[in-house]
Image (spheres, helix red, strand yellow):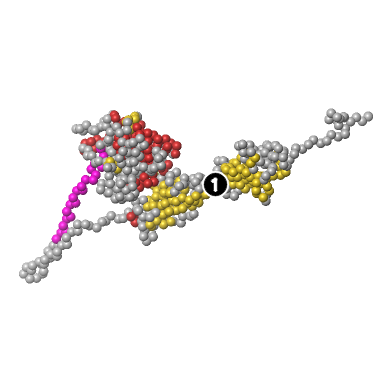
Amino acid sequence: MAAQFGRLRKGAVNTTVAAVVVAALAASQAPGVTTDDAGRRVTTGTQPSADTPAEESATGNSPYYTDLPPLNSPSPSPSTTTPVTPGAGEAGIPATVLDAYKKAEAALREAKPGCNLPWQLLAAIGKVESGQARGGRVDANGNTLSPILGPQLNGNGFANISDTDGGAYDGDSSYDRAVGPMQFIPSTWAWAGRDGNGDGEKNPNNIYDAALAAAHYLCRYGWDLSTQDDLDRAILSYNNSRDYLNLVLSWLEYYRKGTHEIPDGTGSLPSGRSDDNAGASPSPSPTPPRTPTAPSSPAKPGGNGGGSSSPKPTPPPSTTPPSTTPPTPTDMVDHLEDADTAKLTAMAGDTFTEKISTRAETEAGKGVPKVRVRFTIIGATDATFSTGEKYATTLTNTAGEAVAPALKAGENTGEFVVRATVVGRTIAGLDYTATVTERAADTLTRTSDTALTCTPGGEFADQVEVRATYKGAVADKVAATATLIKSADDPTENDKGPYFKDADGKTVRTLTGLTTDANGLLKLPKLYADDTTGTFLLRINTAGGATLTVELKVAAAETSPSPSPSESASGSTSPSPSPTP
């Protein structure tokens, strides 16, 4: 059976003390979180953003453990009872869990060095989310011994997130649940999941996979976690709660002061939960007040005390008043339409000049503003958005249009798909096809004007070097070939004249697999000459159609002039007699 979080009750005094201590540990103000045009989060205030939907967070704003780290200070507020303080053993982290955190930090140090992610932040979140995988109950590969599931996000005390994965991750086909030691909801794991242990799978119930996914999640949008503002933003994006932010910061500070490894399965389980009072039966609704009875009609004028008329019957009060809650912008979206996106084509390594633009529309075709649209790169490609990620979320503007960040082509050529979907709705997505072509050059020039000459059987003193450009810019990593051809009109390989040598010293007159360097330069190997004299041609071709033909001359060395009759046998010349004065 899946191991689900329990809802353990805490006393009112302990709850009060916890709030005081957390506030004292981390008094930094939690900034609000919104998105800019590039999908990055930006600060809008000192509170969590009230309109950030739960499905936009890592956990769906699921409940979390509220136990505090051991403290020497500040002193707790006066109380008739002693607050529950975890023992010094709380500093220990199960061995496999700790290893996963440190490996994730190392991976991010290489992939996103500007993020400055500390492994202690992953430990703090792991502590708050699952008690370090329920005390380190994982196998040697990092898989939890039983699934770790949060409560149903059914709107009863929690967010309302209907099933998004058919129960594939959380075993629930009705509502989503947070899954695994880092408590990702299925819709977030679908794009944020990572393979941290190299087994070819992305498993939210594996601590290596989950820790690496959490690391990348916290480092998206170009945040620098060495700065307090970005650190606050990242934590709030994981769970949009001021109390959550302060609690994670307190554990981060605690782990930074020192921790140690303990055996798997020996960690203690937290007891306090943020949902201690959630899920209780709601209080009964008060009985609707009765509609006042209509007053009696006045006596009719005239007559001797005419009687009053009977009051009109009063209709019974409605027990289900109509809802006055207006639909959200997301509720109004019926479909997505392309907003005149141009053809998406770029050369390998380049940034696409065109951006994807999608319009969220009502059934009548009217644009809907303030709707979150997620763009996801799909397929076997190394292309990313300019943010370095394969996903981006942006808000629609007043015309209902959402523009994705620029796409950055990788080295893999071919087509891939970018899918646009509405966050929080299950309407059909909109697919865009993008194409990456191979790197190309349109111009080749020699870097030297020196004539290339050689004597029969000798070697050319200078090596051929060319520079490749494309539309005036350096054309780096462009594939090229070099062939010694028969003539300008016959590009077939020559069977005589100059040649290259392969690694075994054998004659080669065609070179393939050549590539320009980062500066667009290509330097060919040394050229040699056989006994044939004459003028020969070397032709260099690149992807993209750039061609350069280089002239090579092989000629015998010039001989010294024959001695004149006046030269002596020794080669000296007798001076002419001076004229007689």
Q: Where in the figure is residue 565, as x and y percent of width and height?
A: 88, 34
Residue 274 covered by magenta stretch: yes
Can you identify the residue that label 1 sits on? 439
Q: List the single residue furthest toward the right.
A: 580
Q: Is residue 128 visible?
A: no
Q: Where in the figure is residue 6, as x and y percent of width and height?
A: 25, 41
The residue that appears at 56% across and 45% down in the rendered structure is 478
Residue nearest the viewer, comparing 459 with 190: 459
The residue that appears at 27% across and 44% down in the rendered structure is 151
Q: Quadrant of residue 262?
A: top left
The residue that appears at 61% across and 47% down in the rendered structure is 541
Q: Where in the figure is residue 258, as x and y percent of width and height?
A: 34, 29
Q: Where in the figure is residue 16, as x and y percent of width and height?
A: 24, 37
Question: Which quadrant of the figure contains the N terminus?
Answer: top left
**Which amino acid lies under the numbered mark 1 shown in the image of this protein?**
Arg
Q: Is residue 257 above or below residue 56?
A: above
